[in-house]
Image (cartoon, rainbow, N blue to C red):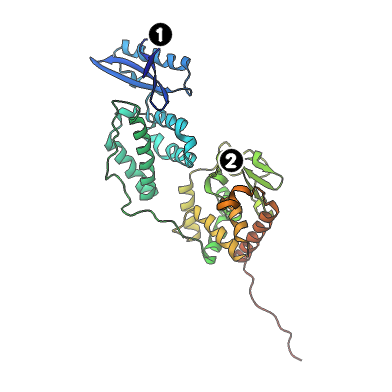
Amino acid sequence: MDYFDEDTTGLALRVTETGSKSWTFNYTFNDKRSRMTLGTYPSISLAGARTKAIEARTALETGTDPRLSVVGAETFQAICDDYQAREGNKLRTADWRKAILERLVYPVIGSRPIRDIRRSEIVRLLDRIEDNNGPVMADRTLQIIRKACNWHATRDDEFRSPIIRGMARSKTKERARTRILTDDELRQVWEAADHCGVFGRYIKFILLTATRRGEAARMDRSELKGTDWLIPGSRYKTKLDHLVPLSAAALELLPAEGEWMFTITGRKPIRGFAVLKLGLDKSSGVTGWTIHDLRRTARTLMSRAGVDPDIAERCLGHALPNIRGTYDRHSYRDEKCQAFESLTGLIDRIVHPQANVVTLSKAV
């Protein structure tokens, strides 16, 4: 159902059967009736929609298709933003999806009108991602693009998604990774990290805290409370606050001042992991691992150090199954603190091995 604005010609609020609301601008260009989406309500107010509609009307009067002139209207990024605003709270991986779009997709097709994006453009984009980040990441990106396009297709009578079957790159189903660093590999990576500046400190910090790549990268000083790091639920995978008591070794890796704990520019958190890790791989001689494998390595080391499995899972922020996870809201700070100290101690013994040699007194 369309509800047309009495003050602005062509502007309407479209309400679907499910109750979703979006602003549209209806017009005729080159003797063809068309409709473009200006944004969703309430993320775009009536005043904002009227402004965009006036921009579109002005473009028409100069002989220009409004889709090419209205800032933010029906660009791929604008559609994805609408999708995130309306559906993001239903997606556990919303932040992860947004990060992939911002890093790999928006710089290439984000500013393009979604109707003008051709299948060949997406194929070239996926080629680039496959070459630089691997076929699995290319398929993950394709999945995100497909969902956004399909969502938009349900809200626009004229849009047809450019995604078709057969565009996936990985021919086999992605399997859960089991890779961990061996003691020798851990020793080599740790030693090489000493010569990799901020990125080296960052790698060590992930090992000592068993955190995810993005959680550690975006750590800022406001999250540090004494010796505790409280990751807010707004940027944590489970959407719950996660407490990480920091060991003395982990605290030593943090700078004494500045907003970001790991930053190269001083203005933004560390990024460009692919290039930085290539340098670390070359220095250490250890390849075939990802930054996330450090989290799995840390969890395995906790078991070796004798940490209780339930406490180890809490250290990683994993929800416990069944009734325990539902009703037990104790933070387990002391237990987690001891677990991280045990992890730190084992890592220290691995990277600084002591020769098992005992000097005996000479017999008289």
| Residue 209 seen from this side | no
Residue drawn at x 46%, y 17% is 48
Q: Please, which residue is most extreme toward the front here? A: 323
The quarter holding residue 220 reads: top right
Mark number, residue 233: 2
In the image, 310 versus 302, the foreground residue is 310
Q: Quadrant of the C terminus?
A: bottom right
Residue drawn at x 43%, y 29% is 82
Marks 1 and 2, the one that precedes in the sequence: 1
- x, y percent for residue 131: 35, 48
Q: Please, which residue is most extreme toward the right here? A: 364
Q: Which residue is mark 1?
A: 6
Secondary element at tag 1: loop
Give the amino acid at mark 1.
Glu
Does 211 sit above or below residue 6? below
Mark number, residue 179: none
